[in-house]
Amino acid sequence: MIDKEFLMIPGPTPLPSRVIAAMTHPMINHRGPLFKKIFTETREILKKLINPDGDIFLIPSSGTGAMELAVQNFTNRGDKVIVVDTGFFGDRFYKMNLSFGRNAVKLKISYGRAVKPEEVVNFIKEQKDAKALFITHNETSTAVANPLKEIVDAVRRVSDMFIIVDAVSSMGILKIDMKEWKIDVVVGASQKGLMSPPGIGIVGVSKRALDFALGKDDSYYFGIKNLKAKGDIGQPFTTFPVSTLFGLREALNILLEEGFEKTYERHRIYKKLVRESLKEIGLKFVANDEDSSPCVTAVFSPEGINGEEIVRVSREKYNVEIASIQGDLKGKAFRIGHMGYINSNDLLVTVASVESTLYSLGYKFDLGSGVKKFINLRLNSGV
């Protein structure tokens, strides 16, 4: 039997063959000229992708490490900061700020919808002395995408506080323009929309945020001052995951070749194909249509069926790896990732697997109707 797996989770995501091939390059000196070339090219493409007017930093870490760098370098102990919580990772930013002695106050939004710009503005007016706003662009735990540009526009009309964005799951999938939108810090990671293995954290900073961080001395491994000094000569501050960097540069070249706007549109189409197909078999979603993510779809389990069991059967019987859900919704829903290096055939297989899994677990519906809906929608979708 050929054991082929479909990896349809919200990260890590499948790797293009070009990325895998790039990572087979023999190990090199991470202080040598070839590394400097790869390191510099990667940073330059990332600048094109998110457009900071300050700099791009690459760190050997997960996305959580990049989030932690943002807390350490762009706020001070005792600062009041606002954290928007639309799910598990918004809450992580809140807990992280508390752990570093920040006076964090949370704007909690009911799970399944995005925060509204006016809600953020009203909360800022209540917390007049807040120094920074932390917000998650795309919340994978609830499959919600916050309207980042509209939120930033609204905030900038009432405050010049630092705006710090978790874009770990949105970078390369949703448009981000730091300079034009006046965002101070964006953190990302290599393993989701950027189609590379885990291991590289990405931090884009504005000029004013960079100036602020360069005046601080209370961080070392994640210290911007140390990262900047080495980055300016094309080197990492510490030993770097060299093979992963080769892969990330190749993945970014693939995105450049497709064109960023085409990539964003492709993911919007993927979202529609998945949601409309699963609606056809009577399933409901954690996120409403307007606020739903182009990166991942969170689906409520039918009554009487545990979401963990759906994930297990899909994996063990059909070799389609979908994801469970975190936090309060655990067991009540499951998630389908549609980000990065996937195509509509992968999604068609996934919809078929979900149908087969649910039918085998006793959910009654017109078997095959979701797949038929998918095929009809795809005919004129362009993917």
Image (cartoon, rainbow, N blue to C red):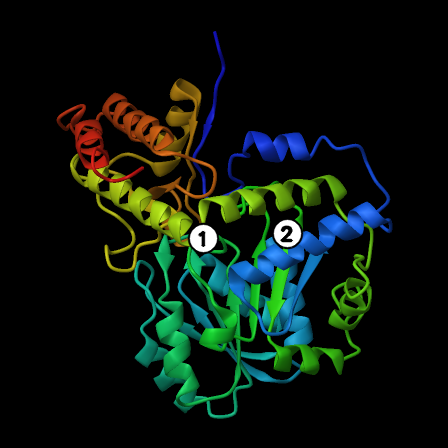
Please rate how many residues cluster around mark 2, counting C-alpha atoms within 10 Å: few if below 14, some from 14 to 19, many from 20: some
User: Is residue 44 toward the left or the right of residue 341 in the image?
Assistant: right
Q: Which residue is mark 1?
A: 260
Q: Image height check: is 149 above or below 365?
A: below
* SS assignment at label 2: loop
Residue positioned most to the front: 257
Q: Image height check: is 375 above or below 161?
A: above
User: Is residue 74 toward the left or the right of residue 11 in the image?
Assistant: right
Q: Check disc 1 and give the amino acid type.
A: Phe
User: Is residue 107 toward the left or the right of residue 272 in the image?
Assistant: right
Q: Check disc 2 and give the amino acid type.
A: Ser
Q: Which residue is mark 2?
A: 62
* SS assignment at label 1: helix
**Mark 1 vs mark 2, CA separation in Å:** 23 Å
The mark that comes first in sequence, 1 or 2, is: 2
Image location of residue 62, percent across then percent down:
64, 52
Please rate how many residues cluster around mark 1, counting C-alpha atoms within 10 Å: few if below 14, some from 14 to 19, many from 20: some
Q: Kindly tell me whether residue 61 is visible in this rendering.
A: no
Q: Nearer the viewer, residue 301 or 372?
A: 372
Check residue 150 in the rendering and tell me which mark sits there, or answer none: none
Image quadrant where residue 109 sits: bottom left
Q: Image height check: is 372 above or below 112?
A: above
Residue shown at the point (46%, 89%) measured from the top left = 159
* Foreground: disc 1 or disc 2: 1
Count the labels in the image: 2
Image location of residue 330, percent across then percent down:
40, 46
